Image: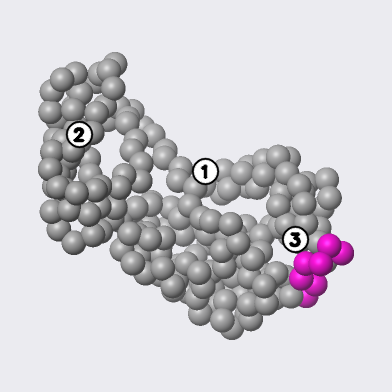
């Protein structure tokens, strides 16, 4: 939740279950409100103050084991785009508040297709990994090969950024990254790709299974 100044109440079944007071400087926060199981809606009602921006909410039964997957990112982002958003309510600065037990980082494709040098990549990726490690473990991935024939980076440039990612993982004591090139046969794979850079449904399924297999170890 990213907020301005305000107070909201959380209600179910006509009963107020908790109050979130944001009368403080803007920040990203997580709040847990406990209440008996209900079939009715969960209502957030403003009590006072100004605007409050809610990033999302998750309801679950406390007695059940669960896994929450948050897909974070934005189109075209390179690793340096993450490390320059250090405000507490934005991507990089907000990672400790999100508090993931495991952060899967796959940021290579936009870097190799936009001329990021391996040295710059390693510096920025090191910062991002350090931030993610504040809350839990990190698993890194390298992207699936782009198509040089469609104007994307040549394979040596792609391989250099992928190698830089693997170096960062080793330097930070992380598990060996999942290698996108290995998943897709070592080069651009038309049958697994939607366009020159994005996997299609079959390609996405292959990536998802690789992540699942690694997480289940």
Q: What element carries label 3?
A: loop
With 50 as the anchor, is 117 left or right in this view?
Answer: right
Region rendered in magenta:
149-156
- Please tell me whether residue 145 is drawn above or below residue 1 in the rendered image: below
- Please tell me whether residue 20 is drawn above or below residue 59 in the rendered image: below
Separation of residues labelled 3 and 2 (CA atoms):
48 Å
- Where is residue 78, by image quadrant? bottom right
Name the one closer to the observer, 108 or 171.
Answer: 108
Which residue occupies 51% across, 55% down? 73
- Please tell me whether residue 179 is drawn above or below residue 1 in the rendered image: below
- Please tell me whether residue 203 is drawn above or below residue 82 in the rendered image: above
Tell me where residue 63 appears, x and y as whole percent.
Answer: 28, 27
Q: Provide the residue designation for mark 3.
A: 145
Please tell me which of labels 2 and 1 falls first in the chain.
Answer: 2
Which residue occupies 32% across, 31% down? 59
With 185 as the anchor, is 131 left or right in this view?
Answer: left
Q: Which label was assigned to residue 216?
A: 1
Which residue occupies 45% across, 46% down? 70
Q: Which label was assigned to residue 45?
A: 2
Label 3 crowd bin: few (<14), some (14–19), many (20+), radius 10 Å: many
* Residue 155 in view in this figure: no
Q: Which of marks 3 and 1 is in front?
A: 3
Tell me where residue 14 appears, x and y as whole percent.
Answer: 15, 20
Label 1 crowd bin: few (<14), some (14–19), many (20+), radius 10 Å: few
- Where is residue 12, by image quadrant? top left
Separation of residues labelled 3 and 1 (CA atoms):
25 Å
Label 2 crowd bin: few (<14), some (14–19), many (20+), radius 10 Å: few
Tell me where residue 102 appears, x and y as whole percent.
Answer: 43, 53
């Amino acid at each position: 939740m990213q907020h301005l100044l305000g107070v909201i109440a959380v209600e179910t079944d006509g009963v107020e279950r908790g109050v979130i007071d944001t009368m403080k400087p803007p920040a990203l926060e997580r709040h847990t409100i406990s209440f008996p199981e209900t079939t009715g809606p969960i209502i957030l009602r403003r009590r006072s103050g100004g605007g409050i921006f809610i990033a999302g909410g998750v309801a679950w039964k406390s007695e059940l084991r669960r896994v929450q997957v948050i897909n974070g990112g934005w189109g075209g982002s390179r690793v340096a785009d993450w490390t320059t958003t250090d405000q507490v309510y934005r991507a990089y600065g907000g990672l400790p508040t999100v508090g993931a037990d495991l952060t899967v980082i796959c940021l290579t494709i936009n870097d190799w297709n936009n001329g990021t040098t391996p040295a710059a990549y390693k510096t920025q990726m090191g910062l991002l990994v350090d931030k993610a490690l504040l809350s839990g473990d990190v698993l890194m991935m390298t992207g699936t090969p782009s198509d040089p024939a469609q104007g994307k980076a040549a394979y040596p440039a792609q391989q250099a950024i992928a190698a830089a990612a693997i170096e960062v993982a080793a330097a930070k004591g992380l598990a060996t990254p999942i290698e996108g090139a290995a998943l897709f046969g070592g080069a651009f794979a038309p049958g697994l790709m939607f366009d020159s850079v994005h996997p299609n449904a079959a390609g996405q399924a292959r990536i998802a299974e690789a992540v699942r297999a690694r997480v289940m170890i």
